[in-house]
């Protein structure tokens, strides 16, 4: 009886190691980029979460209810309440009455909030340029397709 060739253990191990190395390299890169963003935003007194909330308010162009903020940031309302509390304590937003619902409140940017969001956007842009320089030798279409396959 003829033996069916099987993949050698070394071949299986190599494939597993190479796939694992790639996965861990991607995780390491993601954490490194996130750290760069955190450090850059910290220079202007923001966190990733604060910058995200301010950006959503800027993009909306009007005060948003806390429920709308939560939906846009894809998080639960209790997290948004705490985030808005911190932004309000920093003088970046203030709560205003909701004209459509007298029980509701909306988050409204202050002039300082707009200023910080603009400063944060400049920091984010700088990090994006650094990442682009690092990846200059990589085909962007191929990289985008590969990363899009995960999500």
Image (cartoon, rainbow, N blue to C red):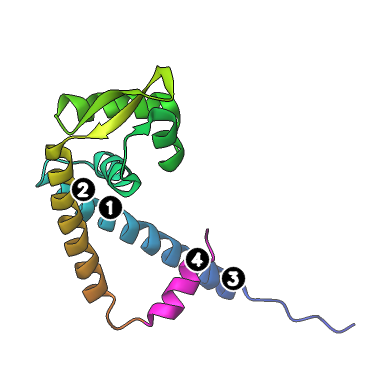
Q: Looking at the figure, which quarter contains the N terminus?
A: bottom right
- Where are the magenta residues, as a range? 139-151
Residue occupying image coordinates x 31% and y 24%: 82
Q: Which residue carries the number 1 mark?
A: 34
Label 2 neighbourhood size at 10 Å, few (<14), some (14-19), many (20+)? some
Whether residue 121 sits left or right of residue 67 in the image: it is left
3 vs 4, front mark: 4
Comes first in the chain, label 2 or label 3: 3
Q: Which residue carries the number 4 mark?
A: 148
The answer to whether residue 137 is visible is yes
Label 1 neighbourhood size at 10 Å, few (<14), some (14-19), many (20+)? some
Residue occupying image coordinates x 24% and y 65%: 128
Label 4 neighbourhood size at 10 Å, few (<14), some (14-19), many (20+)? few
Mark 1: secondary structure: helix
Q: Which residue carries the number 2 mark?
A: 38
Instruction: In this rendered view, identify the residue nearer to me: 150 or 45.
Output: 45
Q: CA distance from mark 4 to mark 1?
A: 18 Å
Check contact, mark 1 vs mark 3: CB within 8 A. no
Question: In this rendering, is residue 17 above or below 82?
Answer: below
Q: Which residue carries the number 3 mark?
A: 12
Q: Is residue 140 magenta?
A: yes
Q: Is residue 121 magenta?
A: no
Q: Position of residue 24 (x, y in %)?
A: 40, 59
Q: CA distance from mark 1 to mark 3?
A: 33 Å
The answer to whether residue 40 is visible is no
Instruction: In this rendered view, identify the residue nearer to me: 34 or 60.
Output: 60
Q: CA distance from mark 2 to mark 1?
A: 6 Å
Check contact, mark 2 vs mark 1: CB within 8 A. yes
Check contact, mark 3 vs mark 4: CB within 8 A. no
How many discs mark residues in the rendered view?
Answer: 4
């Amino acid at each position: 009886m003829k033996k069916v060739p099987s993949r050698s253990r070394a071949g299986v191990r190599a494939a597993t190691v190479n796939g694992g190395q790639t996965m861990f390299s991607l995780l390491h890169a993601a954490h490194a980029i996130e750290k760069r963003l955190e450090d850059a935003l910290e220079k202007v007194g923001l966190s990733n979460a604060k910058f995200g909330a301010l950006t959503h308010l800027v993009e909306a162009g009007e005060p948003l209810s806390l429920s709308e903020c939560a939906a846009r940031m894809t998080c639960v309302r209790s997290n948004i309440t705490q985030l808005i509390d911190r932004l309000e304590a920093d003088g970046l937003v203030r709560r205003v009455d909701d004209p459509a619902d007298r029980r509701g409140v909306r988050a409204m940017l202050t002039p300082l909030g707009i200023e910080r969001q603009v400063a944060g956007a400049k920091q984010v842009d700088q990090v994006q340029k650094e990442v682009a320089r690092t990846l200059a030798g990589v085909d962007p279409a191929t990289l985008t397709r590969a990363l899009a396959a995960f999500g």
